[in-house]
Image (spheres, grey):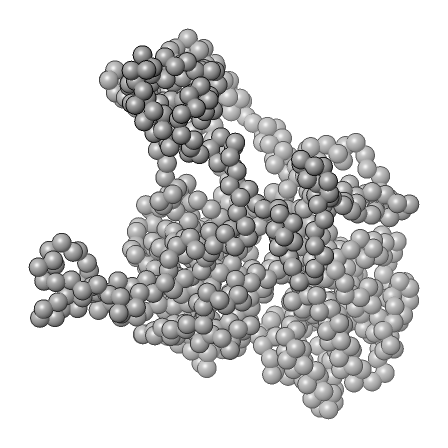
Amino acid sequence: MSSGYNNNEDEYDPNNKEQYRQTEVREAITFLIEITPEILKPSNDLNQISQLKEILISINELMQELIITSRNTGIGIYFYNCETIPPLKNLLIPTFNSLFKLNVLNLSNMVKLNDLLTNHEDLTSVFKYKKMKEESELNSILSKMINQLMEKKEFNKRRMIWITNNDQPFQKESTLENLKRTVDDFDGFGFIIDPMFISFNHEKPFKFDKFIDIFSNTNFLKINQGDDDEFGGNKRIKLEDQTSPTLFDKSKQQINYQQPILSNQIKKKILSIRNINRVQFSCPLILSDNGSVGGSLGCNIKGYTLYNHEKIKKSEISLYLKEEDIKKVYIKSNLINEKTQNPINLKEDRNLSIVEKKEESGIFKGFPLGGGDDILLLNREQIEFLRNYTFDHRLQEKSETKDIKKEDLDEVEFPDDIEDQDDNNYILSISYSKAPYLKIIGFRDLNTFNPSYICSTPIFISADLNNGISANNASKQSGGFTNSLKTFASLYRSTLKLQKYIIVIGCIRSNSKPHLYAMYPTQTICSSKSDLKNENNTEDVDDELPQGFLLCKLPWLEDFRALPSNYIQYIEKSTTEEESESSLIDRPLVNEFKNLFKNFEINSYKPRDYPNPSLNYYFNVIKHELLQLPFLPTDKSLQKNDITFRKLVDLKKNLTDDDKSTISKIKERIGELSTNSKNSEPLSTTTSKISSTKNNEITTEEILIAWKNNNLNIFNMNQLKQFKKLNPDIQTAVKKQDMINNISDYLEKNIKKMN
């Protein structure tokens, strides 16, 4: 198996602004629900609630979550095969209605859906089954849905969730041909159809043979088929070769179709829509960079966000009540000159950005230096230069390779695979990689991995099925490594077999510095839930990570810092007094903590189960105000809004007598240690004396003593500036070290005068 790398100069062109453009996911989700007699009947699996009500309740919960995490999402709910009864509105086709059309999440639509569910226990009073006169009307309804999606151009991701329990959508062959053409139009416009087939009961399974015919020209109905979806989907790439030798040969693969769901799976299926895969980066993973052994071997990969922290802008927090509506507070601010107190008017030019307008008005971004007295002003071009040119990733041309004579060879060390031998010269070819890139530099055993060294949130890595070719920029890119999925799958299987993780170096963005990373395989030690069992003794695979790697940022270069001086002095003092580190640790206290913690270990942690309590409370208040629901004092308590606090309360209630006894011993021992530490000598008397005088005025005598001991750095910048004011001949400096050098030069020249 071999892979070739295709060079592409345009992809890394520094003048190509397209590669730096960041796209925000603005997804439009429309629900097209078919009304049938079965969907209106109470279901035993749903505690006598109809399938339709379960669908609408799930959509209501979905909207309440999306307005917190993804407020730019659009939602629209449409029905067909039903009469037009308020609050439904007809859409010019006899049996086609909407509760509300596709629009960005807003409070009025949420109230409309909530009122429908609250005021109508039995939805049959609103939804009356009315079969379409001609089955060709279904084709008109789908065409109308295309128009609804096309009208909302502010969304860059548009899809339709088609929910039905009718497995006989057509009878005539002509209707099938029309439906196939309309479905092809969805695919042609880049819209996605996500069918959701519901079986009414176990005795009557859903037969989706006719839907296979409708979707035969597209991949909407297939699982793990088609192109990689950049924003979402439930598709998982199988990397582990188990039985089939032709696992990656699509021509020989069996096609798997979407399976129908039961009534009790409706909510889980709809709520899974909120899980959107966001691509963080795409780059080549280089296994061998033109070496004599491996040649040019690698694959293209994509990195996906695992989870995000819930955030809200400050401008969105301020709301006020106007009659029965909640309105947003709009704040207007003016720029004022600090010295003249006159307002600064920005130039009104739509072609200029806010930063450019501010620069033309004399407003620049400032960075404090030293103690903050001096400010470094940078314009937009300077800031952009510092951000985009932090590291030189440019390739070195052959004409720039360094010729090394034979007599100088002993002074040069280089690998065998980059050395070209000649009779007279040895040429060392130094090559750089185009950013972004990741290079494999080694492997380590899984049991040597320390999770505490992870510097940032891990990123999920999977193969790029398009081999580096972007659908949005296909004309500008010629691709990367071929057979990326096969290479990536082979690498994944090898790490599982050998129980290794990969060490890589590189940068995941073209304008960033290189860094050290660990590629840790999923579904293995510390990254799998395969050993966990649910109540039915089946594997809990719902939240299992797909097959791939976790890219973990490791400490490197700028992440390392020197130890504090007082800690070093403390260690040196302990060493001189023949006190080992083990003697400084209170072993009985450590053992007591271990005995206590082992009773409260959790097998896994799901971030989504611990939402932000502040955001929850904020939106809970809005919900009660909007729906005119009573908001009791008990609903405002911390325990009611913070899941972490509730867990702690439950944990406290479940403490045994042995646990309480252990906690008492720990408290008693900590009290003894606190008493002993108060009576003990401080770690460093020298440091405490210096810190007590740091903010005081210094005398000439103190400066001279520190200068003779080569210890002027014990004073801060403000104290050094005070001494400079007393001696104006000392040259001005911005950095502390430069100021120390200037004072030292001054003292050397004027030592006799100072005495």
Above or below 635: residue 285: below
Quadrant in which residue 102 is drawn: bottom right
Please state the horizontal and vertical placement of residue 459, each as a whole percent of the image: 48, 54
Above or below 213: residue 536: above
Quadrant in which residue 585 is drawn: top left
> How many labels were placed on the picture?
0
Point 76% across, 63% down: residue: 103
Q: Nearer the viewer, residue 498 or 185?
A: 185
The C terminus appears in which quarter of the rendering? top left
Please state the horizontal and vertical placement of residue 694, each as a whole percent of the image: 45, 19
Quadrant in which residue 688 is drawn: top left
The furthest residue to the bottom: 174
Please state the horizontal and vertical placement of residue 273, each as a whole percent of the image: 65, 60
Left or right of 330 in this view: 702: left
Point 25% across, 20% down: residue: 575
Q: Can residue 210 be seen here? A: no
Q: Can residue 657 be seen here? A: yes
Left or right of 25 in this view: 392: left
Above or below 629: residue 370: above
Q: Nearer the viewer, residue 511 or 629?
A: 511
Point 83% across, 55% down: residue: 108
Point 52% across, 70% down: residue: 228
Q: Nearer the viewer, residue 550 or 744?
A: 744
Left or right of 655 in this view: 597: left
Please state the horizontal and vertical placement of residue 691, each as a whole percent of the image: 43, 18
Above or below 660: residue 9: below
